[in-house]
C-alpha cells in the first residue's frame, strides 16, 4: 500500500491529525496510548518539541496501526531523519518543493502548509498527499469552499490552526476532509487521561458532522 492509499485509509477511519507540540519522550507512550487507543490514526510530533525523533520512534513502534510522523518539517534532511526514526508522516507549515519531493521519494505522506490557490496547485503538482490549510484562523469555511471549487475533486484539504470541536461542522460543510488538532487536544504536560477525554470529544464532534 503506497502513501496515498495509507493516508486515505487513515482518513476513512478517523480524519483527525493529533499535533503533539512540546511532547517529551517520557510522555510519548502514555499520550500515544490515549490517542491511538481511542481511534486516532494520525499522530504528529512537531520537530520543535524536545527530542522529537525519540518520541516519534517510540510511538511508531508501539502503535504500528497508526501513521506517526513529524510536523514543522522544513528541510529534506529532516524528512530523512523522520523516516529513519520510523515516521511515515511529514507535515509542514509551508510549502517547500524539496521537502515534498523527498517525502514522495521515500513513499511518505506529506501535508505541506498552503494558504492560496497558487500554493495549493503547486504543492499538488510537486506530489503532496494532501494540503494543510494553515493557519485556519485566516482561512475561514468560505475560503475552503472557494478552494474546493477550483482544486481537483480528489485533493484532500485539512484546516489546521485554532480548530475546536465547535468549528468542525462549518468547515466540513465547506468541503474539509479532516483537521489537524493542536492545543485544543494536547498541551505540554497534560495528563494522558485528559488527552483521552479530549480525543473522545473530537471524534464525537467529527462523527456529528457526518450525521448533520
Image (cartoon, rainbow, N blue to C red):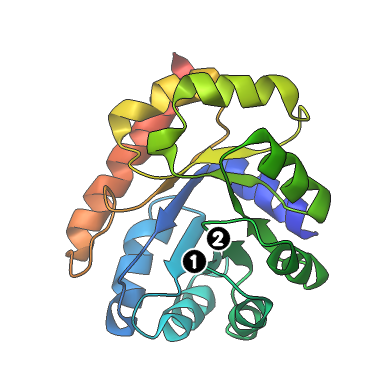
Residue drawn at the location 42% of the way across and 20% of the way down: 170
Within 10 Å of disc 2 (Cα), the crowding (few <14, some 14-19, many 20+) is many
Residue 210, visible in the rendered structure = no
Residue drawn at the location 54% of the way across and 40% of the way down: 158
Q: Quadrant of residue 195?
A: bottom left
**What mark, if any, has residue 72 been given in the picture?**
1
| Residue 59 versus residue 36 in the image, above or below | below
* Position of residue 138 measured from the top left corner of the image (x, y, whole percent): 42, 35
Residue drawn at the location 29% of the way across and 27% of the way down: 166
* Position of residue 165 measured from the top left corner of the image (x, y, whole percent): 31, 33
Q: Are marks 1 and 2 in contact (CB under 8 Å)?
A: yes
* Residue situated in front as seen by the camera: 97 or 209: 97
Label 2 element class: loop
| Figure label count | 2
| Residue 117 versus residue 91 in the image, above or below | above
Of the 4 image quadrants, the one containing the N terminus is bottom right
| Residue 32 versus residue 165 in the image, above or below | below
Residue 11, visible in the rendered structure = yes
Disc on the earlier residue, 1 or 2: 1
Residue drawn at the location 75% of the way across and 40% of the way down: 121
Label 1 element class: loop
Within 10 Å of disc 1 (Cα), the crowding (few <14, some 14-19, many 20+) is many
Of the 4 image quadrants, the one containing the C terminus is top left
Residue 3 left/right relative to 31 = right
Disc 2 target residue: 92
* Position of residue 44 measured from the top left corner of the image (x, y, whole percent): 47, 63
* Position of residue 186 measured from the top left corner of the image (x, y, whole percent): 27, 57
Amino acid at each position: 500500500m503506497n502513501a496515498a492509499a495509507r493516508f486515505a485509509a487513515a482518513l476513512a477511519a478517523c480524519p483527525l491529525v493529533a499535533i503533539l507540540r512540546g511532547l517529551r519522550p517520557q510522555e510519548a507512550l502514555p499520550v500515544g496510548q490515549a490517542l491511538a487507543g481511542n481511534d486516532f490514526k494520525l499522530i504528529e510530533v512537531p520537530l520543535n518539541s524536545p527530542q522529537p525523533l525519540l518520541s516519534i520512534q517510540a510511538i511508531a513502534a508501539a502503535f504500528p496501526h497508526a501513521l506517526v510522523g513529524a510536523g514543522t518539517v522544513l528541510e529534506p534532511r529532516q524528512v530523512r531523519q523522520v523516516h529513519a526514526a520510523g515516521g511515515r508522516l511529514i507535515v509542514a507549515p509551508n510549502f517547500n518543493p524539496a521537502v515534498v519531493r523527498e517525502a514522495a521519494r521515500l513513499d511518505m505522506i506529506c501535508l505541506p502548509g498552503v494558504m492560496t490557490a497558487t500554493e495549493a496547485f503547486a504543492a499538488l503538482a510537486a506530489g503532496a498527499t494532501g494540503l494543510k490549510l494553515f493557519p485556519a484562523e485566516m482561512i475561514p469555511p468560505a475560503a475552503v469552499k472557494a478552494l474546493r471549487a477550483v482544486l481537483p475533486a480528489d485533493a484532500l484539504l485539512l484546516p489546521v490552526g485554532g480548530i475546536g470541536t465547535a468549528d468542525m461542522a462549518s468547515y466540513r460543510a465547506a468541503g474539509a476532509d479532516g483537521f489537524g488538532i493542536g492545543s485544543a487536544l494536547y498541551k505540554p504536560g497534560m495528563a494522558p487521561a485528559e488527552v483521552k477525554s479530549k480525543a473522545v470529544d473530537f471524534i464525537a464532534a467529527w462523527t456529528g458532522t457526518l450525521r448533520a
